[in-house]
């Protein structure tokens, strides 16, 4: 079985794509190749994971200037032609689109060549590429029931999450309370601005509290300077560019302040209560819609970025950190939304498509 996985850009696209690739390789002996762009995280993460990576020219269409859109449209036919040549050479049995810049030309090429296609969509509302190809794909793996209407032959599989996050040990008895602030690989400017401003009051309001704050590489120095300037007890604050051992971070965290992209699947798998601040410029406002799913289930508090002030953020965090019973109910609600076995279901769908081609 040969599988081409197309897409990338952010960790929210690349991490699940790699998880799917590994499972196809390990479970079915599949030969897996990736297609991405030179601007995405895939340029680093895919080779590190040991997979071949092809690069195609493709850019943004949403929330960008007219010139950028025109360049993207100009590059699209060349990108499709490149992917057609690649597929004729590699001869994949299935092409899997995970969203992101490279997904569009690759999925278009697969449709033109009549190669079986599958879309993977982790958000409540699909991005532009998956909406465009949704009615042409042979199958789609989605995270939410309401997303199935955008695709043919969609199945609610959930989002691939590392198995160890479903089986986290209990936090050690008597361990200090902890707030985990995380926002993906790039961090979040709103967190880097407001959390240092409320750090002193937050640490005073919650005895023994520690804060682990993931700031992103670009904003790391600025965030650390802001915490220093705040006058907060720095022995109780850890500021990092990127957090590598997320399972252990989830074990120690009593409450998580986060964006609401692909992180929401891990919050559910870990059974953790959260305060979610959706990224307002996310394509089609999908982060808000993701957060609403958790908030409506009682698993999270939704705070829109336009409503974030020192006072609103402080009240949301201290209110939950001071109420263990409410946090426990939210954590249980989050876990009820989790879908263990998503990776096996997605890999099985890919294998079925490959078998229909060969059959």
Image (tube, helix red, strand yellow):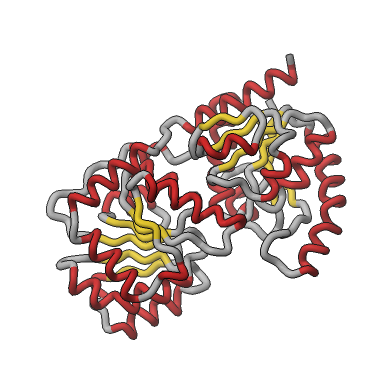
Note whether 278 is above or below 315 in the view shown.
Answer: above
Could one spot residue 355 in this view of the protein? yes
Name which residue lies at 65% across and 55% down.
Answer: 43
Name which residue lies at 44% across and 64% down.
Answer: 304
As rendered, which of 2 and 80 lies closer to the eye?
80
Name which residue lies at 32% across and 68% down.
Answer: 238
Q: Quick one: which residue is furthest to the top in this view?
A: 359
162 left or right of 121 in image: left
Give the image location of residue 55, x and y in percent.
74, 51
On the image, which quarter does residue 134 sit in?
top right
248 left or right of 351 in image: left
As rendered, which of 351 and 207 lies closer to the eye?
207
| Image quarter hosting the N terminus | top right
Count how many numbered circles sit on residues in the image.
Answer: 0
| Image quarter hosting the C terminus | top right
On the image, which quarter does residue 276 sit in?
bottom left
Could one spot residue 48 in this view of the protein? no
On the image, which quarter does residue 178 sit in?
bottom left
100 left or right of 252 in image: right
Give the image location of residue 160, x and y in percent.
49, 38
Give the image location of residue 190, x and y in percent.
45, 71
Note whether 92 is above or below 202 in the view shown.
Answer: above
Give the image location of residue 231, x and y in percent.
27, 83
Name which residue lies at 84% across and 32% down.
Answer: 113
């Amino acid at each position: 079985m040969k599988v081409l996985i197309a897409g990338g850009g952010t960790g929210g696209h690349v991490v699940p794509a790699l998880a799917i690739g590994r499972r196809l390789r390990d479970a079915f002996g599949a030969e897996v190749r990736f297609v991405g762009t030179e601007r995405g995280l895939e340029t680093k993460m895919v080779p590190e994971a040991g997979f071949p990576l092809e690069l195609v020219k493709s850019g943004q269409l949403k929330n960008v200037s007219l010139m950028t859109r025109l360049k993207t449209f100009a590059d699209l036919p060349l990108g499709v032609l490149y992917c057609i040549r690649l597929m004729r050479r590699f001869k994949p049995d299935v092409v899997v689109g995970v969203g992101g810049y490279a997904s569009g030309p690759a999925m278009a090429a697969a449709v033109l060549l009549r190669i079986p296609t599958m879309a993977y969509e982790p958000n409540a509302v699909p991005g532009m590429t998956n909406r465009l190809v949704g009615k042409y794909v042979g199958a789609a793996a989605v995270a939410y029931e309401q997303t199935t209407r955008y695709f043919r032959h969609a199945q609610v599989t959930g989002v691939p999450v590392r198995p160890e996050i479903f089986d986290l040990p209990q936090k050690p008895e008597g361990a200090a309370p902890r707030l985990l602030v995380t926002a993906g690989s790039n961090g979040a400017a709103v967190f880097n601005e407001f959390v240092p401003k409320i750090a002193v009051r937050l640490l005073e309001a919650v005895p023994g509290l520690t804060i682990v704050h993931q700031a992103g590489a670009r904003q790391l120095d600025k965030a650390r300077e802001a915490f220093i300037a705040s006058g907060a007890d720095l022995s109780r604050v850890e500021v990092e560019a990127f957090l590598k051992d997320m399972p252990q971070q989830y074990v120690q965290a009593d409450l998580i302040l986060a964006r609401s992209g692909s992180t929401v699947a891990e919050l559910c798998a870990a059974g953790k209560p959260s305060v979610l601040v959706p990224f307002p410029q996310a394509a089609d406002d999908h982060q808000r819609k993701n957060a609403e799913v958790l908030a409506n289930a009682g698993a999270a508090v939704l705070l829109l970025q336009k409503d974030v002030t020192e006072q609103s953020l402080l009240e949301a965090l201290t209110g939950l950190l001071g109420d263990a019973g409410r946090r426990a109910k939210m954590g249980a609600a989050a876990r009820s939304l989790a879908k263990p076995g998503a990776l096996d279901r997605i890999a099985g769908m890919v294998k079925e498509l490959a078998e229909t081609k060969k059959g």
